[in-house]
Amino acid sequence: MLDVDSILADRDVRIVVCCGAGGVGKTTTAAALALRAAEQHGRRTVVLTIDPARRLAQALGLTELDNTPRLVKSVDAAGGGELHAMMLDMKRTFDEVVLAHTDPVKAEEIFNNPFYQAMSSTFAGTQEYMAMEKLGQLRARDTWDLIVVDTPPSRSALDFLDAPARLARFLDGRMLRLLLAPARAGGRSMFNLVTASFGVFSRAVQKVLGAQLLSDLSGFVAALDSMFGGFRERAEQTYRVLQDRETAFLLVAAPEPDAIREAAYFAGRLRQDRMPLAGLVLNRVHRTQLPQLSAARSLAAAAALDQAGEHDSTAEVLRIHAGLVDQGVREKRVAGRFTRDFPEVPVAEVPAQPADVHDIDGLRTIGAALARPLSRP
């Protein structure tokens, strides 16, 4: 059985990454873990959400979250613990990287470049690159004992893991090297060098893009080349950190076929990449307080009461109990698909809540449930 408190209390664990399919309570789980680490274990904790959902801010009592960690003041922390929360702003993080690795004049030129404006806001993969960058920044600052990361739904989270390799392929690509050639040749006009150096290929590109657009692209690529060799190294370093014992991956799933399938897919990938999978958090589990009373016996008793024409409310309660038992059996069967394939992965079960979690007290309830996993019938 997964012992969440031992993970949160372990001072050697500095990063907890929550991952899984969408809609399974991953953001809530990340917030609950971060809150419990601060309140019960006295750790200075920051929770970083990459998912654009706003639920985290609302649950923590904050009006909004942005790229700067914000102190959650309603935390009753023990032993000097603190909780900060933030949400990744990929454009602002990209801007911070530019400002940190070039002079103000060059930075302004980059900010005004149309290709930079597009890539920093909407380019596929930028969010994952910047998530890796932000995680590296948070760890390097050494301000927090524990960083809890709430990733996008799992296939996007795989992009998060793949960010260093994808960036390396992009920077080392043949097309990029061709576009960088003029910038590395001494700063001559892109238009002239294209015509002189690239022959048929360059003229075809110029015909499609136009000279100004090609010049903009060249300027952007040259800036990328001068700045992001360091970014690639940092991303690869962060990737190695994710493989280290200081990181604990927690899969979050609901006992539903699609969510369990995603969890198994991700677990296989973590195993392949030798990343430390600490356990599975199974959310919204339905169990009954009377497991010894089977669904069949419940329904038989309800039918007997109906036939006698008495105790309508008791018969209804028995039927509800029977439905709950059946649902629990189905959920256990679905979850078994994961546990059979990954018997070494410990599991914590969190009972279904009567309402959505929307405040600190609700997060405390989830944290306590994680610390005292629901026992199986």
Image (cartoon, helix red, strand yellow):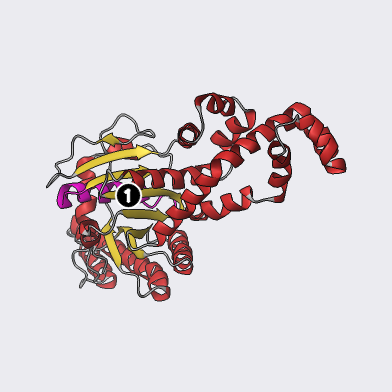
Residue at 26 percent of width and 51 percent of height: 33
Compared to residue 376, the image places residue 108 above or below, namely above
Task: Identify the residue at horizontal 86%, vertical 41% (top origin).
Answer: 199
Q: Which residue is mark 1?
A: 148
Q: Nearer the viewer, residue 99 or 147?
A: 99
Residue in view at x 78 percent, y 28 percent: 211
Q: Which residue in the rendered view is the most extreme toward the front?
A: 186
For the question of whether residue 354 can be seen, the reply is: no
Q: Quadrant of the C terminus?
A: bottom left
What kind of secondary structure does the magenta stretch mostly adopt? helix
Mark 1 is on which residue type?
A: Val
Q: Is residue 377 left or right of residue 40?
A: right
Residue 160 x, y percent position in the rendering: 48, 51
216 lies above or below 238 = above
In the rendered view of the protein, which quadrant contains the N terminus? bottom left
Of the pair 247 and 141, the residue shown nearer to us: 141
Snapshot quadrant of residue 20: bottom left
Q: Position of residue 50 (x, y in %)?
A: 42, 43
Magenta stretch?
22-43
Residue 221, image x, y percentages: 65, 38
